Amino acid sequence: MGDHSNDHLVQSDDPDHPANLIPRLCKQFYSLGWVTGTGGGTSIRKDDHVYIAPSGVQKELMRPENIFVLSYPTPKYPPSARQYIRKPLDLKPSACTPLFLAAFERGAGCCIHTHSQWAVLITLLVEKSHGKEACFEISDIEQIKGIPKGPKKGMLGFHDTLRIPIIENTPFEEDLTGSLEQAMEQYPDTCAVLVRRHGIYVWGDTVAKAKTQCESLDYLFQLAVEMHKLGLTWTQSG
Amino acid sequence: MGDHSNDHLVQSDDPDHPANLIPRLCKQFYSLGWVTGTGGGTSIRKDDHVYIAPSGVQKELMRPENIFVLSYPTPKYPPSARQYIRKPLDLKPSACTPLFLAAFERGAGCCIHTHSQWAVLITLLVEKSHGKEACFEISDIEQIKGIPKGPKKGMLGFHDTLRIPIIENTPFEEDLTGSLEQAMEQYPDTCAVLVRRHGIYVWGDTVAKAKTQCESLDYLFQLAVEMHKLGLTWTQSG
Amino acid sequence: MGDHSNDHLVQSDDPDHPANLIPRLCKQFYSLGWVTGTGGGTSIRKDDHVYIAPSGVQKELMRPENIFVLSYPTPKYPPSARQYIRKPLDLKPSACTPLFLAAFERGAGCCIHTHSQWAVLITLLVEKSHGKEACFEISDIEQIKGIPKGPKKGMLGFHDTLRIPIIENTPFEEDLTGSLEQAMEQYPDTCAVLVRRHGIYVWGDTVAKAKTQCESLDYLFQLAVEMHKLGLTWTQSG
Amino acid sequence: MGDHSNDHLVQSDDPDHPANLIPRLCKQFYSLGWVTGTGGGTSIRKDDHVYIAPSGVQKELMRPENIFVLSYPTPKYPPSARQYIRKPLDLKPSACTPLFLAAFERGAGCCIHTHSQWAVLITLLVEKSHGKEACFEISDIEQIKGIPKGPKKGMLGFHDTLRIPIIENTPFEEDLTGSLEQAMEQYPDTCAVLVRRHGIYVWGDTVAKAKTQCESLDYLFQLAVEMHKLGLTWTQSG
């Protein structure tokens, strides 16, 4: 492990193989402003493997050989069974790894972490407007229908209130794991957790769902910031 | 019907065939922020067929084989003559279909539905500034000349007032059909209807006209939001 | 004239031939938001010919065969010597043509017309802030050095005040010609004229100069709008 | 020197050779709005050579043969040892050259100069909000971790305060050298200096570090401008 014997895990002609898909997604996320300056990250779980973008690289230039692979037998195995089985020797694994795993343990197939400025601004506005209240809420916007009501519950309706919990940031990214898991338990239906002054983690059953949910949330955050500037409230009750 | 016997309807070497054009348009609309997170849609009518983008797919990745085809003999046939003659088995037809048909019944050749944030913000600002008045109005901006005065009436002039009706959103997209048709009757010259907290439907005689009218309207909505932020009024009378 | 005998005028393997350059520039201007919805236009003078983008087409899809060519012997010939020697039969010549010619008569080699929202907002802010004063002024911004002091006078300095005259819009674009020429005479050093509620005309000795001057001005307009929102003044005197 | 005898210095099949990398970076910076209208510049030091983008060209169209090469034996040689050994005859060397050299003398391998509007707005806001205080400060934002604490000191932490000095602009770019070097001495840990009403210089050990640090700073400037608009402070103390 750590040698080149498992390089075949990131070599595939299938454009939708995780080792090919993660670089393509990261390039797209770069152009959306989500992973500026090596920030953010992406991970895909497929069968018994977890594929993870490395830390500290220019996300728009990532290549399949830069991908880390983690053994991930099944969610029921003890965490000790999980270990890197393919490591690019010149790169560092992502500090987001335990946070991605928390999403996979709840059944996700893909988890995306962005530093989107709209997400950061929302965490600052909620801080300001509502004091201790650590939850972004919005309702009666069509795009809310792009977010699931909860696992196997279908999508939110137009009049439903979307709630995304906000956790406090920590100096080291891996130290977020505890509060992220706590938020996941407190909001078992959420597909995302905002991190104050930092960004967001979004997950979904598949890559397509994680990505489109991440897009829908970012759309709603941007709209909400603009609404705030224009003096418009995010929910009918204010 | 529903089998693969009609796959030839979406197979063409002509880059401007609707089955090739819809994916290309959707990719462009994605980059304009109009169809984020599987939102929005596009439909083209050509001869006796209506081509429709599917529901719930990543719009920038759409392919010709994802396109639905509806039989559409002529506007004078009863609606019962209209039925899907080509369905991708793994996809859902767009909930916008009856709204697209409403535009085709009034002679349109293409109808575009976007979730543009500028459109949504306009519906919120009109709500706020004018109470029950459900119509966006702007005048004395050059780009207004990109919008037709009405079917076969030429384009609006610089001093004309552009009016786009706003209808209330409904939890299910297909339930918008009634109020969309009502707005079309009340504003027989309009080429677009805004949907509150949702987006816009824009149509035109041809694909080029629908697209450039959609662009001109989006330009005007963005400009109007910025004007509002700067304390400038949309019409000379205020 | 008007037939296909002069098609060779728009056929060249040289990527910098005006008939190839105009479509490439227009595609770039489209992505900058300058020619949304068929708005705006571009023209290049080379030797005894003027090449002009057509009216009413999607600017990002323009092709060499869409270009109009006007005979333009020398500036000293009477205007009657100028006539279309190559017309795409299915397209309309640009209504901007007399305005482009006004720039060429003053020695320009390229003229660009945009509907940039930043330009339009500046014309609205000057209208509002300064009453009858029809001139945008800004100083002490590095990017001002991208604008010439006047023909054959070198570039503006950091502490110089950039002045761009603003003329009133007219219902028909060709009717702008008189006031554009008047502004050119009143401001003989300007390389651009803003048109209220409409956009801007920018010209330069070469295509590169016209384009980079247009970019520098657009940068300054955008910055000035943001400065206004933040309560910052455009000149040291306020 | 100045003839074509050293053209081999800018001819390489390696896509990461400085003469190939600078044009690629400049094209990317153009799309980020950092080098609009020929503004800004980029330089790479490699072994005994310094490669510099020329002045006054369209940055998105730059080619390897446009690159200037300066002899740069080692930082210990007297500055007189440094001279152009490859000059494109039709282009002017960048006025930023002495500023790039100041960064290389402090060990940098790459220096980037942008006219980013976010950087300019920050210099205007600090001017306004804090009087004579010539330093941008922000803390408690995750993206701060993309900026180094100082040479060989690792990266800033989440709770650390990022400080970027601001120097006054001068009419001629080369005249900035003195105050840039003074700021570098006063803030020996900084990897960037803001120039009032002008832009920013950012440097790093490698091209990747200079570029990602430049991105992280630009992200923070944009966020800080938006925070200011929303009435949010940049540091916990206000």
Image: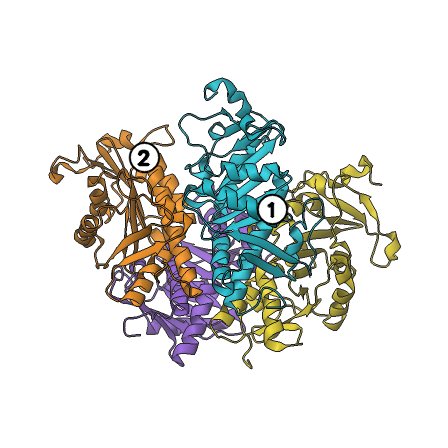
Chain colours: A cyan, B yellow, C purple, D orange
What secondary structure is marked by label 1?
helix
What secondary structure is marked by label 2?
helix
Which residue is denoted by mark 2 in the rendering? D18
What residue sits 34% from the left and 59% below the top? Answer: D122
In front here: C27 or C137? C137
- Classify mark 2: residues with Cα within 10 Å, few (<14), some (14-19) or many (20+): many
Which residue is denoted by mark 1 in the rendering? A185
What residue sits 52% from the left and 76% below the top? Answer: B233
Task: Give x and y (percent) for residue D194.
Answer: 28, 54
Residue B191 visible within the image = yes
Quadrant of the drawing holding the C terminus of chain D: bottom left
In front here: D160 or B105? D160
**Amino acid bearing label 1:** Glu
What residue sits 74% from the left and 60% below the top? Answer: B103
* Chain on which label 2 sits: D
In front here: C167 or C2? C167
**Amino acid bearing label 2:** Pro
Q: Is residue D61 left or right of residue C88?
A: left
Task: Give x and y (percent) for residue A71.
Answer: 55, 26
* Chain on which label 1 sits: A
Residue C33 visible within the image = no
What residue sits 43% from the left and 36% below the top? Answer: A55
Q: Are marks 2 and 1 in contact (CB under 8 Å)?
A: no
Q: Are marks 2 and 1 on the same chain?
A: no
Quadrant of the drawing holding the N terminus of chain D: top left
Q: Quadrant of residue A221?
A: bottom right
Q: Is residue D195 left or right of residue A2?
A: left
Task: Give x and y (percent) for residue A80.
Answer: 54, 27
